[in-house]
Image (cartoon, rainbow, N blue to C red):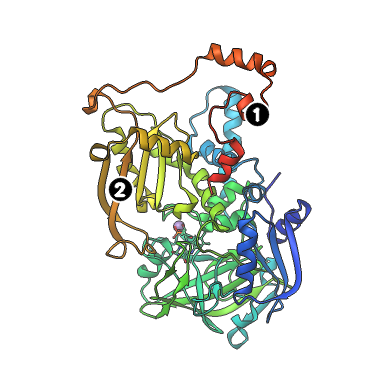
Amino acid sequence: MAPPADLRAWIALLEREGELVRVGAEVDPDLEITEIVDRTVKSGGPALLFERPKGSSHPLLVNQFGTERRMCLAFGAPSLDAVGARVQDVLEMQPPQGIAEKVRGLKKLKSIADSQPKRVRSGPCQEVVLRGEDVDLDALPIQRCWPGDPAPFITLPAVITRDPRTGTRNVGMYRMQKLDRRTTAMHWQIHKDGRADYLLADGRLDVAVALGLDPVTTYAASAPLPKHVDELMLAGLLRGEPVELVRGATVDLDVPANAEIVLEGYVQKDDLAEEGPFGDHTGYYTAAEPFPVFHVTAVTMRRDAIYPSIVVGRPPQEDAWLGKATERIFLPAVRMTVPEIVDYDLPVAGAFHNCAVVSIRKAFPGHARKVMHAIWGLGMLSLTKAVVVVDEDVDVHDYAEVFFTVGANVDPKRDVLISEGPLDHLDHAPTLQFYGGKIGIDATRKGPAEGTRPWPEEIRMTDEVKALVDRRWAEYGIELGGAARDGETSHISRPLRRLLRL
Ligand SMILES: Cc1cc2nc3c(=O)[nH]c(=O)nc-3n(C[C@H](O)[C@H](O)[C@H](O)COP(=O)(O)O)c2cc1C
Ligand SMILES: [Mn+2]
């Protein structure tokens, strides 16, 4: 099934799949919605369309990405790994051999060509155009999420800028604190591409903010692509269809034609405002800091525009699944650079940048350390605070197995590497902001080549005895769950293990 073409098609799909509840009661975007969403997310509940947010005529959509199933529906894929495979296919393109491969190669080339955004003459996002004095952010049901937040924050925007030197587009998801009817702050953290565009601008930089997109394009805004790669290209590739763009009404930027709402405006050099505190995905309030002021010069909308929102906070929250999508979709790219990596897991509870568990095909002494340094040198993964490296046979998504392996295989004096480097903008733990310690834990098997005693053998039953017990199971008259009957040795069933990822 193709991914939904716009937010309305997405809402219709969610509704058909029993994945959406319309809330008709009047509900306050000031705190009340957060508490409702928090309970809904934590119980794996549906997407919510609040039809009567207090003080606004725009419905508010939240929790659209809150489960693995909805994330897969968003991509029109059976699993997130299947989405990753689409990327892998393109990354691994080789000169085709023979006719059949050439035909397949053409299909791939077409998908690359289709990933390029396409300019169209008009789009629904400009059915309503409000300029100047008519701009009024108070009309939107912007949520104030947590009691310590000083103001409402736009939480699910796709912020579009262009590199002033190269003209390359960037799309990123950065929260925006409402300052007044026509300005917001722009929370461009220090390592992010939007910030770099801002710093390169000499004077004024046009900015467009798209709200309420098809889910793949919304996801793409959160994807950690290298600076010179346009996030809309990734969206096109994953959708199998180009993102359609229209010229902004008042800015020198193209905006997604299917957006529900577009805020157009500018930021300018040295025009900053105090932003925050904000109850963030770290589980803490992040401190107030100066960030650029975004001046809104026009709001363009679809008729009856729907406003999208997300609540972040102590994990797990809805953004867990945006992060998991990135983990799966970027695995092929990570493997392209570090091919010995078999798999990795960024635990949701570790807020993604706090911890990475990586399994490798170990081939030489010190290999685990090589991989730690690779992670600390790779895109946004470079901000990872703790890296745990295990052998390829360990399931990195099974935290009990990882815990067992670390406990069993690690001599802390020999296998722990304390290093230092850049850390996430929002990490409050290091003494200095942005910079501090890193820990690498080598939980791979070692051997004499790495200066250890010979490594012992792990306990495993023989295949013959397993087959025998399989055959005779009914005879024993022991009632157990399916896993034990099928020779699954772990105490934890597969479904429960999946759940424990959260
Ligand atoms: C819900 C959500 C909110 C986010 N808020 C911010 C934010 O306020 N500031 C920021 O720099 N990154 C934020 N991020 C992370 C960025 O979207 C992410 O790092 C993205 O790759 C940035 O795009 P860029 O690499 O083009 O800068 C957020 C991510 C999500 C999923
Ligand atoms: Mn980018």
Residue type for callout 2: Ile
Q: Position of residue 418 (x, y in %)?
A: 25, 47
Q: Position of residue 216 (x, y in %)?
A: 61, 53
Residue highlighted by disc 2: 439
- First reached walking from the N terminus: tag 1 or tag 2: 2
Which residue is at 66% across, 24% downward? 478
Vertical placement of residue 13 versus 451, above or below = below
Instruction: Quarter of the image for the N terminus: give it.
Output: top right
Q: Residue furthest front?
A: 477
Vertical placement of residue 460 versus 160, above or below = above
Residue highlighted by disc 1: 480
- Where in the image, quadrant-wise, is ligand 2 located? bottom left
Q: Is residue 367 left or right of residue 359?
A: left
Residue 29, by quadrant, is bottom right
Q: Residue furthest bottom?
A: 133
Vertical placement of residue 117 versus 121, above or below = above
Label 2 neighbour load within 10 Å: few <14, some 14-19, many 20+ = some
Given contact means CB atoms under 8 Å apart, are the residues at marks 1 and 2 in contact?
no
Q: For numbered disc 1, what is the local secondary structure?
A: loop
Q: Position of residue 242 (x, y in %)?
A: 61, 52
Residue type for callout 1: Leu
